[in-house]
Amino acid sequence: MENVEPDPELKAPRVQFGDHLREYRILAGKRQKELAAMLGWSVSKISMVERGERPAREDFVRAADAALRAKGELLARWRETVEYAARWPVWLAQLAEIEQQADILRTWQPLIVPGLLQTPEYARSIFCGRPAITAEEIEHNVVARMERQRVLHRDSGPTMWAILDEGVLTRPIASEAVMAQQMAHLIALDEHPRINVRVLPYSSSVTTGLQGAFVLAGGPGMPAMVYLESITMSQITADSGRVREVQSRYEMLHNEALPRQASLRLIGEMAEKWTK
């Protein structure tokens, strides 16, 4: 698989500031335990801010700046990330924040492999389909997508259940080589203890997911949310009625999907087909 290095400027704003805090703490020769004692915070809270799992308020940043003798530089970095966050599309910023906080993500995709499970080459092909997009924008989008995938590989990352329509495996995206690589990647992800991929076969007559893709997210300290995907206006809602409806749709799809081993066999068969 092509190795795409994450561009720091494309990280979620909260993650960006966490990187800055860690950098200044190390430069000051302080351990998390020492900084926590200086600020009156717990070590776990400091760790969560550094990992981008908890937002940093201005009063905390001012206190950390003083404790680390950053001379206002850490505060300036925080303001830069706040300004950067304001330039993100609202739905994308919210989705990145939700992925950071969630302990479980359940997604349904009737057309393409979910973004968090895509290879760089597959993602690049998807972005190429946007009208008037430039080559530079495509590459920035690919790097940003690969960066978002890091959330799944954190020690405290969320569990992800992904249900794919069988058509996702058979629909050609770019070249046969790209499809073969993507299928192999899905198989490899089965080794991850918190990633679960299931396939809804053509033999299923269920129509509950034909209206579009979605992601259900949940976790401690956050309401159940659903991300509804569309071509021009994706949205996130915590409306209990809509969340319940999507949860019901997910359960119907899950009940119709192939079990783990059967799903892996089908994905493997398609990997072989695309390799020929």
Image: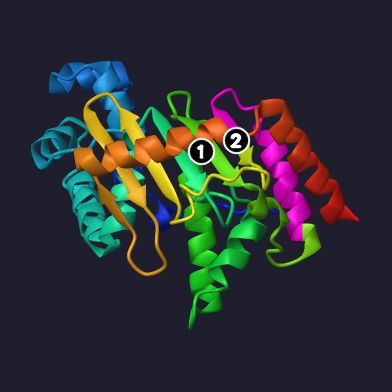
Residue 80 location (% of width, % of height): 23, 56
Q: Assess disc 2: are there few (<14), some (14-19) or many (≥20) residues with their C-alpha within 10 Å of its C-alpha.
A: many
Q: Main secondary structure of the magenta part?
A: helix
Image location of residue 89, percent across then percent down: 29, 62
Q: Amino acid at mark 1?
A: Leu
Quadrant of the rendered structure where residue 164 is? top right
- Per the image, label 1 sits on a secondary structure element best described as helix
The figure's colour scheme reads: rainbow
- Cα distance between the residues tagged 1 and 2: 6 Å
Mark 2 lies on a secondary structure that is: loop
Instruction: Give the left or right position of residue 154, taking residue 264 as reference.
Output: left
Which stretch did the figure color magenta? 178-197
Image-based side of 77 in relation to 193, left or right: left
**Residue denoted by label 1:** 253
- Please tell me which residue is depicted at 21% across the width and 53% down the height of the picture: 82
Where is 220 relative to 106, above or below? above
In the image, residue 20 sits, relative to residue 139, either above or below, namely above
Foreground of the two, 34 or 155: 155
Pointer 1 with pointer 2, Cβ within 8 A: yes
Name the disc covering residue 257, or none.
2
Is residue 221 magenta-colored? no
Q: Residue furthest bottom?
A: 132
Number of numbered discs visible in the structure rendering: 2
Image location of residue 256, percent across then percent down = 57, 35
